Amino acid sequence: MTPEQRDFTFFWDCNPFMMNVKGHVMFATKKISPGGHWMNITYVACKKLKTDFAQSAEAYARVSIALQDAFISCWDEKYRSNLIRPETYINQYIDEDWVPTLQTPPFPEYSSGHSVISAASAATLTNLFGDGFAFTDSTEMEFGLTARSFDSFYKASEEAAISRMYGGIHYRPACENGLKEGKDIGNFILDRVKTRKEQLAKN
């Protein structure tokens, strides 16, 4: 990886319970979850636009719904496909000592959870705040990482997705197809979840 690829791979790690083994000592490092990361991006967008209470509540509610349905869809596919992770395959058939950059999660590989939930969140936030919404994501700063800037929510979701391949925990199809899955879920929800104001305008 290039230094840039390595930086954004760790930025999007979002491992809420990373296990550390030091000799006979085992302990967990707790960080933000992928869903929590996108909720904070929602906060960043609301703060930038100085949204009022109702607008902020709508943004949080819509992103929460998108996240929940994206996770359900992704995990349904994971346990249908039941595909082994790169670390398992490489250790068994290529190099038994190889370890990925990121810690391999304890569930099947396909599709990529981060890719799916990121694209679903991006679709929701783009609908609310517009395409080409530039923002600086400071979510990971409290964990010692540098903030990253993006030209749009979709650009952020694409970087989050490919970070999983660079991290060695996903194959490319899981990332690319995960983005499509997430965007489709986001748009599906946007088409069906309406505010009272939208319903009144429609009628």
Image (tube, rainbow, N blue to C red):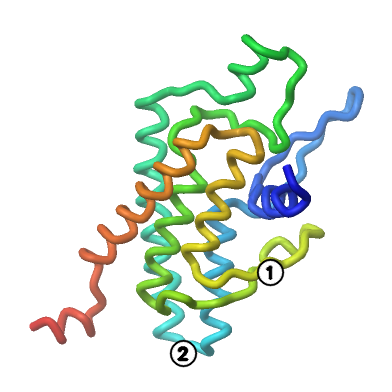
* Nearer mark to the viewer, of 2 and 1: 1
C-alpha separation, residue under disc 2 versus residue under disc 1 = 21 Å
Q: Residue at x 56, y 74 (%)?
A: 43
| Of 157 and 76, the residue lying toward us | 157
Determine which residue is flagged by label 2. Answer: 52
Task: Where is residue 137? Give x, y as percent.
Answer: 64, 69
Residue neighbourhood size for the residue with mark 1, other residues' Cα within 10 Å, grouped as few (<14), some (14–19), many (≥20): some
**Residue that badge 1 annotates:** 138
State left or right for residue 116 relative to residue 197: right
Q: Which amino acid is tagged 1? A: Ser
Among numbered discs 2 and 1, the one appearing first in the sequence: 2
| Image spot of residue 39 (x, y percent) | 53, 65
Q: Secondary structure at mark 1?
A: loop
Quarter-of-image position of residue 96:
top right
Q: Position of residue 176 (x, y in %)?
A: 44, 44
Pick out the residue farthest to the left.
203
Q: Quadrant of the N terminus?
A: top right
Q: Amino acid at mark 2?
A: Asp
Determine the residue positioned at 67% across, 15% down.
91
Q: Pick the residue in front: 144 or 27.
A: 144
User: Relative to residue 129, is residue 188 drawn left or right?
Assistant: left
Q: Which quadrant holds the C terminus?
A: bottom left
Q: Which image quadrant is residue 25 in?
A: top right
How many marks do you count on the picture?
Answer: 2
